[in-house]
Amino acid sequence: MVEEARKLTEHANVRERIDVVLRIMGTRFGGRHGKGRPLVDALEDVAQESLLHGDIAFARRFQRFAGYASGELFLETVENYYDDEARQRSEKYMRRMAAMGAERAVAALDVLCDQNPEATAADARALFQGIAQSTDYLGIGPGEGGIQLSTKYLRRLQEYGHMELVLRNLPRPASAEAARLMSDVLADADAGLLAQLLELKARQAGLAALRAAVDNPGSSESTLHACLKNQEWIFGGAYVAELARRQYTPDTILDIPLLRGDGSLHVVELKRANIEKLVIRPHGHLMLGAPAHQAVSQAQNYLRVMDENRHTILTQYGVDTRRASATVVIGHPQYASGSVTSQEIAETLRTYNTHTARIEVITYKTLIDSAARMLALSSAAQDPEPNEEPAV
């Protein structure tokens, strides 16, 4: 798949980085087979170089390759995206499984009718409900005359779990007429509009997951980071994409590196949402607490290091880090102590941010509220006949 992808780009710099991947894999230039962290880094470098050339789809392709190389994605998942033959084999397999399930359903109904000629649709429904519930108690067994499955078939069982999740989320028309109408609508639908609607649905789900994590007082920074990974839209329209590489110098690992439209770097530093002393009132006046000041100092050090290594980073990775900017996301008013209101926290942060040039501090509430407003506007844009004006 990497070799086939190489044929799809016209950018020499991207091809050069793909050649590094192939060299590590041992499929080109007589190299020996390699994997692990060097391969993941090389794949991410291809993704980043593609982002710099504005080829988002090609970057996503190599981000998925890196996900497989790092063990985050199954090979079958990547093949379904970029290997037509593998996808056709998988679809054929799924069709066979669906046909087998339908045949087993018919056999079960035959048994029911033989045993109870007066059986009704309600009896058939109860039968299949019982079958569905009983599957939770089925197992392969530890051995002792049972079946030992290879890794290949264990992976198949995991795929069945993915299939179940997909089937659970399929739309269920209320009637045959509704099913026919849905089919007609999809047949005439504009592919671009459908893609926009799917993207909107994915963004809504991502924002809901972030909101749930923030509302959980025990959520760690890594949990919040997972919710925000590849969700650069949440931070506003000024950013093209999230960069694949998070480390540009030996002593700095960035939480979320974003690429601006002009090719410069923007750093997002994430802290916990559950911060009690986000804003304090030591002498009658409100000011940021120690956790926020520590986070800002950390961001300042990152920007200083980026400035000092600007030439090296620009040469090696093509990212301009000179005068990079940063956003610190920390805290939420619901966790603040000291009888400080949400409005007071917002005003305190606004005052602080007016005195800083390159670093902005915001709360998760501000981030979520802003993203929610963006989604509301997007939803209104997709509605050809809105019933009311969007809320200001």
Image (spheres, helix red, strand yellow):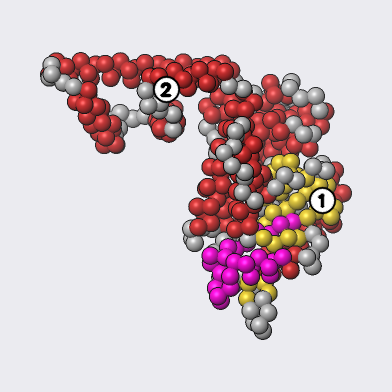
Q: Residue at x 26, y 16 (%)?
A: 106
Q: Would residue 369 appear left or right of 324 to someone viewing this image?
A: left
Q: Position of residue 362 (x, y in %)?
A: 67, 60
Percent coordinates x, y for residue 224 in the rendering: 57, 53
Q: In the image, is residue 259 part of the stretch drawn in magenta?
A: no
Q: Quadrant of residue 263?
A: top right
Q: Is residue 106 left or right of residue 317?
A: left
For the question of whether residue 93 can be seen, the reply is no
Query: Which residue corresponds to mark 1?
Result: 321
Question: Disc 2 marks which residue?
Answer: 178
Circle 2 sits in a helix, a strand or a loop, which is it?
helix
Amino acid type of the residue tagged 1 in the rendering: Thr
Which residue extends farthest front? 388
Q: Is residue 292 above or below residue 199?
A: below
Q: Would you call the spot at circle 2 few (<14 residues within 10 Å), some (14-19), or many (20 or more)? A: few
Mark toward the start of the polypeptide (1 vs 2): 2
Q: Amino acid at mark 2?
A: Ala
Give the foreground label among 1 and 2.
Answer: 2
Residue 258 visible in the snapshot: yes
Residue found farthest to the bottom: 283
Name above or below for residue 47 compared with residue 297: above
Q: Which residues are magenta?
A: 326-350
Residue 333 is one of the magenta-drawn residues: yes
Residue 246 position in % (x across, y down) = 69, 48
Q: Are marks 1 and 2 in contact (CB under 8 Å)?
A: no
Question: What SS does tag 1 mark?
Answer: strand
